[in-house]
Amino acid sequence: MGSVAGPERVGAWSVPAEPDRVVAPDRAVAPDRAVVQGFYDRMRAVAPAAVGAIERDRAAGPGREFGATACGRLVRSLDAAGVRALGMWAHHWCLRFYDDDTRPGRRLVREIAGRRGLGWTPDEVRWMLGESYAAPPAADDRFALPLAAATELPPAERAAVERAAVERAAVERAAVERAAVERAAVERAAVERAAVGRVGHGQRRPAGTAG
């Protein structure tokens, strides 16, 4: 996903990906398709206002209190269900399709994560966790909203979400470490090849030298 800047982005950002593209960490506990369709219907209802607010905040630049931003005003205008839909939409677009132009959207996610008593449901949290799995590791706050929302769930549901996030983080750390080892091996091999080449070049006799 590229920059959110410009009117050509509004159409794409206003329509979340179709439910059959949803990624969940465990299909056995993923929300029912009909439930997910309801999420997308709710997100489409808030998406145009969300796109406009994020664009205005990008143009205004950082440094303002959240309540003074367009996103802050939008949050105040919504009831709890609307804020949850806004949070799911922002989580989907600004973390799953992470790039450097989504700073206002990521701030919106963090601010919603900091609110309590929004009435998050287990299905909503599971869906957001699946989106977190689909987000790139560069989006280091990709678990912020589902983990915060999970605090409103029954203990067993909360524990399952937290465990899944921890396990995912461990898998990603292992992948990063493995990639670092492989990269070091490639670099070491290149250095060794270069050293062999220098030795071979030094052993060659200059042209015209007697044998």
Image: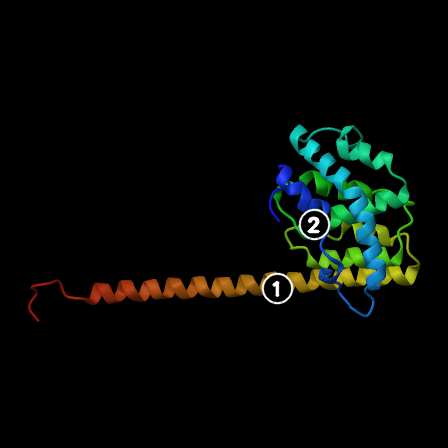
Inspect the image, locate mark 1, and give the three-letter code of the amino acid beneath it. Answer: Ala
Check if mark 2's residue and mark 1's residue have beta carbons within 8 Å.
no
Numbered disc in front, either 2 or 1: 2
Q: Is residue 14 left or right of residue 125?
A: left
Inspect the image, locate mark 2, and give the three-letter code of the amino acid beneath it. Answer: Leu
Residue 141 shows in the view: no
Residue displayed at 72% across by 45% down: 14
Binning the other alpha carbons within 10 Å of mark 2 as few (below 14), some (14 to 19) or many (20 upward) gives many
Q: Is residue 42 left or right of residue 170?
A: right
Disc 2 or 1, which lies upstream in sequence? 2
Write down the residue under mark 2. 95
Q: Secondary structure at mark 2?
A: helix
Measured as percent of width and height from the top left, residue 194 is found at 33, 62
Measured as percent of width and height from the top left, residue 209 is found at 8, 65
Residue displayed at 78% across by 63% down: 164
Measured as percent of width and height from the top left, residue 94 is found at 69, 46
Write down the residue under mark 1. 175
- Please identify the quarter of the rendering in which residue 25 is found: bottom right
Measured as percent of width and height from the top left, residue 78 is found at 87, 38
- Please identify the quarter of the rendering in which residue 191 is found: bottom left
Residue displayed at 68% across by 31% down: 62
State whether residue 18 is above or below residue 71: below
Residue 85 shows in the view: yes
Binning the other alpha carbons within 10 Å of mark 1 as few (below 14), some (14 to 19) or many (20 upward) gives few
Q: Secondary structure at mark 1?
A: helix
